[in-house]
Image (cartoon, helix red, strand yellow):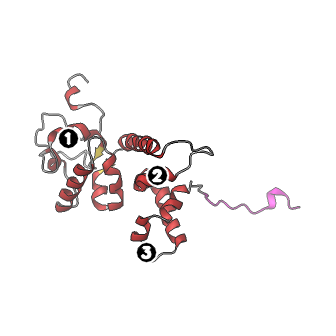
Amino acid sequence: MVPARECQVFDVPVIYIWDVVSWIYQHSKHAAEESSTLSLIGKYWIGLTRFMQNPLSEHAALSAHITAISFGDENQHLVEKLLIALERVLVDMTNKVSVEINRMVMDSYYQHLLPLVCVLGPRKVNTLVRKIATLVSNLYKCYIHSNVLCQGGILVNRGHFIKSGLLTTKIFLNEDGPDPLDATCIHLEDYELA
């Protein structure tokens, strides 16, 4: 036997990834549309890398197929109840980490997270995405604040869950009032109390 001090040591970084989501993606309709020229293993690797980069986005992209994930040996949950519970968890987590609106404009795959933002339903998301697509790639706060993209009441309710990436820019229509996108979790009506 070779002594331990004479053995060659390799410092290779190893990452362990939970691959159930990648297996589901590999056989999904979305994978077939997106990368039809790749083999199944190629689609699997795409799913793995995406899951490693953004697990929340990958779970959101599964939509109703998320119920195929097994959480133990005894899956005795009704599919409908499990789907509702998983959607609630996705909404909670999405609103904790927020959605970067500029990234959503550039990356259509990231748009899977947008319906999970509080107050935004499928119709509001479709309208928002269409309006953003007609604007310039960088979205400034003044567009959101001036109701070009959505109504003010909707902005007040979901302003804490969307990041614009321009929080230091001084583009305001009303400099005396609170900034709806200032990355705090204080509701706009409660600023005076804070």
Q: Residues within 10 Å of mark 1 (few under 14, many from 20)?
A: some
Quarter of image, res 168: top left
Which amino acid type corresponds to the residue marked 2 in the rendered image?
Ile
Q: Secondary structure at mark 1?
A: helix
Please tell me which of labels 1 and 2 falls first in the chain: 2
- Of circles 1 and 2, the one toward us is 2
In terms of sequence position, does the residue under pointer 2 or pointer 3 come before the other?
3
For disc 2, the marked residue is 66
Residue at 43% from the left image edge and 70% from the top image edge:
32
Q: Secondary structure at mark 2?
A: helix
Q: Position of residue 114 (x, y in %)?
A: 31, 50
64 vs 149, left or right, is: right
Residue that sits furthest to the top in the current view: 193
The residue where tag 1 is placed is 154
Magenta range is 1-14
- Residues 181 and 152: in front is 152
Residue assigned mark 3? 36
Percent x, y of residue 89: 43, 41
Q: Outermost residue, right direction?
A: 1
Residue 182 appears in the rendering:
no
What amino acid does circle 3 point to?
Ser
Judge by depth and name the residue closer to the eye, 123 or 119. 123
Do the residues under discs 1 and 2 have CB atoms within 8 angstroms?
Answer: no
Residue 104: percent from the left, percent from the top? 30, 56
